[in-house]
Amino acid sequence: MVHNLKNNTLLLLDYPQIISEVSKLTTFYASREKAANMIPKYVEKEVTRLQIETEEARTLIDLEGIINLRDIKDISEEVKRASLGSTLDGIQLIDISNTVNSLLTLKNKILDHENKILVLSDISRNIPDLSFLNYMINSKIDHNGLVKDSANPYLKQLRSRLRESYNRVIDELKIYINKDSSHEAIQDDIISIRNDRLVIQVKSNLRTQKPGIVHGASNTGMTLFIEPYSTVELCNMWRELVLEEERTVLLILHDLTEQVGVIATDILIGVENASEIDFIMARARYSELLKGFRNRNHEIVTTVQSSKLILNNARHPLLADDSVPLSLNMDKSWSLLVITGPNAGGKTVALKTIGLLAAMNQVGIQVPVDDGSLLPIFDGIYADIGDQQSIENAASTFSSHIKNITNIWKVATSKSLVLLDEIGGSTDPEEGSAIAQAILEKFSHAGIVTIATTHHKSVAAMAEESNHMRNASFILDSTTLKPTYSMIFGMSGNSSAITVAEKLGLPDEMLKSAKQKLSPQSMVIDKWLNNMNAKTTEIQNTRNEIDINNDMIKNHRQTIESQIQYLIENTDQILQSTHNTAKKQYETINSLLDQAKAILSWAQYSDEPKQHIEKSLQEISDLKDVIPTSLLHLYRNKNSSSLDIDVGSEVIIKDLDVIGTITSYDKTQNKVDMKVGNITLNIEAHRVSATNSIPLEKVPVKYSYNFKQTFDLNSFELDIRGLRGDEAKIRIDAFIDKSLENELQQIRIIHGKGTGILRNIVRETLSNHFIVREFKPEIDGVGGHGSTMVYLR
């Protein structure tokens, strides 16, 4: 029963069309057969392997393009005959040779990238290397199936004699035709072959003029095909050589066929593995056509126990590209979704999209969804969709639905996916609603992932009140009343039948009567649903505004962080530019003042009062003293090749606020060796300056721009990527001390993956630190081997 239910579901989901599309993309008979039998797998290990195969095939397409195996013919029958002792002809052997060559080409192309496509490489290694057979066949048979003269020395000599013999017969017959005495008896001067004999065409009424052996006549009986007695012996010699040549060729074909028969099993194994690869390539090509999500890390394939069902902008693979995508997020805390909305609004398409993508995922096709989607591996996909009426069994639509749902209930587990379309329909609305609620409650309590569509408002109300169910709805455009095909999560809808009827022109008296006939309960539920949807819409709008604001804040933060980082990385260049500007401004002002002083010095010979000139000169001198020459002094100090601090002096690294002692000074490089604790740093001289003697342990270490708070308020992280080893050790020690002061028990050090040098430094430093209780690589998906979690005492 389980098998039948699964197969019936695939039919309801239009899965055979997917099979057809994949089959079109295969390139030879055996892989087409595999595509035709393509069915979903329901075991985690098998599904994961299928997805890995498809991703590797897409990688291979990126590297090599599409590998075409159309040269592979269906040679299974020929190979079988060869193994049983039959002799194959030249064309059949060439087909086998082309197939063997295609197998070898496929194998080599895959193994050229074996480090990138591991699974496909393993499959290709199972393809035997039959290049020797390909060489043997091609060396003796040409592309049109004829045995070559060079197949063996005797055949070459034999064919040379055969051509000579044939030409002798032809020459003799031409002489016979052109004799004057018999020219009128010749019907046509063409030499023909009848019954494997070379003959001439003679008029039947004059046959006595050309005696010989008659080998046939034309349809009209006007022409006889005669072999003259004079050429019989020559023709016999030619025929003997022909027969000898045929025997020799047959022997060569027999020998080659024997070789094929000996390795028949290897050939068929090669074809089988090639067909598997071609089938995988077809899945990959179809995934590309769908723009399926690249499953490089196989993150879309998850076990049902540890995942949610998340679809981000999922597209139905058989609908047009402009169709409205579907998004869905089913948390593990609940398992049942009720979808409501108008007829032809998209509810059934949504069910088919979810079910079809789940089935495709489990045959190894990369489905058309956006990043962040998660599809559990279901142990069964079951659906009750469409009209299940059975004329043969005299069952009504409702009866068929109930029977089908009952069978599904018997086999479905908490690892299954169940899709129920228009549950509780096709019968009395009140009873149908009650049955629908009872069914959904059972499926929900059993933890079965279930998605159901309905027109019953009471079912939507039940879902709203349950902790294990949620609502979603498809709505109509408020202006045109046409379906939007867009599903709104967290809202319930209705069929909008009266609204649509009013829009379509149903008379007012009928509409009024219809509204009056609505039950009080229906009106209450309608009012309740409308209020709830209004609040849901308001909450959704608020969330959208928050998301927009968060995006703006995130963008601003990124901009500010990038600007800060630029300032940190370009401090020297900025200071250099400032010094250059200050120097130019100082020199310009100094020059102008000198010019003014020179002009005034000439003024003493003018009629200007002397005391005024002396006063102006004094003001110029005072102004020059006020100019901030310290900027120029700073500029000179920064670029000076000499250091005013002696070896043995205690200095501070200005951009790190770390104190150490100078142990040596290289004037040519303008660098100093500086000892900090047990570590020696080699840095540029301009980065250090003199400071008072302060014990190293009391120096405040400033890392404010490196600290980054995580979601856990008790956890901090340090990013040391890009630092040299000695600087990294200093920062780690200071960071641990700072964390201890703040009473932190857990910290994170980001060192990146790279060559592993920083990672080793981090772990070596942590191993020797008495404050560190434990450290380990961060879990995959967060930092992996690019970061280390540290637990302090």
Image: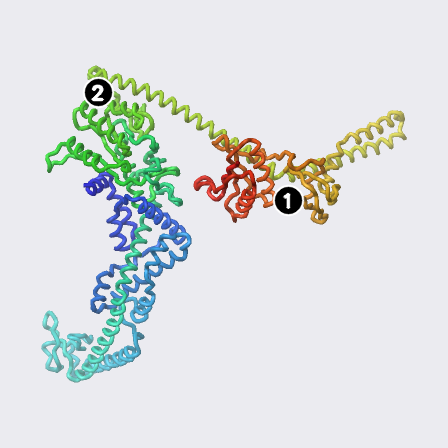
- The vertical placement of 739 against 35, above or below, is above
Question: Which one is closest to the eye, mark 2 or mark 1?
Answer: 1
Q: In the shown orientation, is residue 454 left or right of residue 783?
A: left
Marks 2 and 1: CB-CB under 8 Å? no
- For marks 2 and 1, the one nearer the N-term is 2
- The vertical placement of 576 against 78, above or below, is above
Quadrant in the picture for residue 694: top right
Quadrant in the picture for residue 113: bottom left
Q: In the shown orientation, is residue 297 left or right of residue 422?
A: right
Dot 1 falls on a residue whose secondary structure is loop
Amino acid type, callout 1: Asn
- Residue 244: x %, y % from top left: 22, 78
Circle 2 crowding by C-alpha within 10 Å: few under 14, some 14–19, many from 20: few
The N terminus is located in which quarter? top left
Q: Which mark is residue 506?
A: 2
Q: Is residue 367 visible?
A: yes
Q: Which residue is denoted by mark 1 in the rendering?
A: 678
- Residue 73: x %, y % from top left: 26, 59
- Residue 137: x %, y % from top left: 30, 68
Amino acid type, callout 2: Leu
Q: How many marks?
A: 2
Q: Is residue 102 visible?
A: no
- Residue 23: x %, y % from top left: 27, 49
Quadrant in the picture for residue 176: bottom left
Dot 2 falls on a residue whose secondary structure is loop
Residue occupying image coordinates x 23% and y 79%: 166
Of 13 and 756, the residue lying toward us: 756
Of 344 and 556, the residue lying toward us: 556
